[in-house]
């Protein structure tokens, strides 16, 4: 079918739709930094992403390690169940380990936030396409997910801590 056989009105609508689609595409604005600075920005970006991944890994390891320590405290208390002083020490250790672990989780969460701010600064110097790709997920959604995971980790530590304390209370002299 040739263009001549298509009614003029249909042809105008079709070409207008194509023109509007092209106009809706965001304009690609290239980075204004030189190549050496661009390479430096990419290196900083990679380093920042690695820091975020490392921080998340440490958070999960802190959570798992804390749960393992609680299990060890219960096993020690069972072994020393006749020694009331040792059970008191293990009870205090439960509080200290739990509080320290939750504090560490908060520190690592804060570190992730700082690293995300660095990424935003780096992205501001890159092309508009890089910023658009990074903005496909809203900052609000990312923060909600991060804090939900932090809440889950803290809840796991608190729950295990309370269970540990409940178990230790059995062996405290009355």
Image (cartoon, helix red, strand yellow):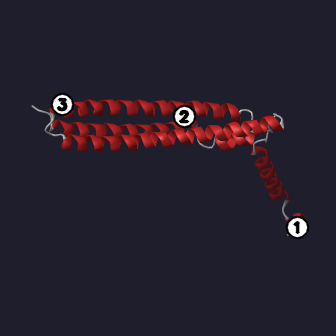
Mark in the foreground, 1 or 3 = 3
Disc 1 on helix, strand or loop? loop
Where does label 1 land, which residue? 2
Q: Earlier in the sequence, mark 1 or mark 2?
A: 1
Q: Quadrant of residue 80?
A: top left
Could you tell me how far apart the alpha carbons at marks 3 and 2 are, in whole angstroms? 41 Å
Which residue is at the front of the view, 146 or 53?
53
**CA neighbours of label 2 inside 10 A, class few (<14), some (14 to 19), many (20+):** many
Q: Quadrant of residue 87?
A: top left
Q: Is residue 98 above or below residue 76?
A: above
Of the numbered discs 1 and 3, the one sitting upstream in the chain is: 1
Q: Residue 112 got which mark?
A: 2
Q: Nearer the viewer, residue 30 or 74?
A: 74
Question: Which residue is disc 3 drawn over?
Answer: 85
Is residue 99 found left or right of 55 in the rendered image? left
Q: Position of residue 143 (x, y in %)?
A: 52, 36
Q: Are marks 1 and 2 in contact (CB under 8 Å)?
A: no
Q: CA distance from mark 1 to mark 2?
A: 59 Å
Mark 3 Cα within 10 Å, few/some/many (few <14, many 20+)?
A: few
Q: Residue at x 83, y 38 (%)?
A: 35
Q: What is the secondary structure assignment of the residue under circle 2?
A: helix
Quarter location, residue 71? top left
Q: How many marks?
A: 3
Rounded to the nearest whole Å, what is the CA distance between mark 1 and mark 3? 96 Å
Q: Which structural element holds mark 3?
A: helix
Quadrant location, the N terminus = bottom right
């Amino acid at each position: 079918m040739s263009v001549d056989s298509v009614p003029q009105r249909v042809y105008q609508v079709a070409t207008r739709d194509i023109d509007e689609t092209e106009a809706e595409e965001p304009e690609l604005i290239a980075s204004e930094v030189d190549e050496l600075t661009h390479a430096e920005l990419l290196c900083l970006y990679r380093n920042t992403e690695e820091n975020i991944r490392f921080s998340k890994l440490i958070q999960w390891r802190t959570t798992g390690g804390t749960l393992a320590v609680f299990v060890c405290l219960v096993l020690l208390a069972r072994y020393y169940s006749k020694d009331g002083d040792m059970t008191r020490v293990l009870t205090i250790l439960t509080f200290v380990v739990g509080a320290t672990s939750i504090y560490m989780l908060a520190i690592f969460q804060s570190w992730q936030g700082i690293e995300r701010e660095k990424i935003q600064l780096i992205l501001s110097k890159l092309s508009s396409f890089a910023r658009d790709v990074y903005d496909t997920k809203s900052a609000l959604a990312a923060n909600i997910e991060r804090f939900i995971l932090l809440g889950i980790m803290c809840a796991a530590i608190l729950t295990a801590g309370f269970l540990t304390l409940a178990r230790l209370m059995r062996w405290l002299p009355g």
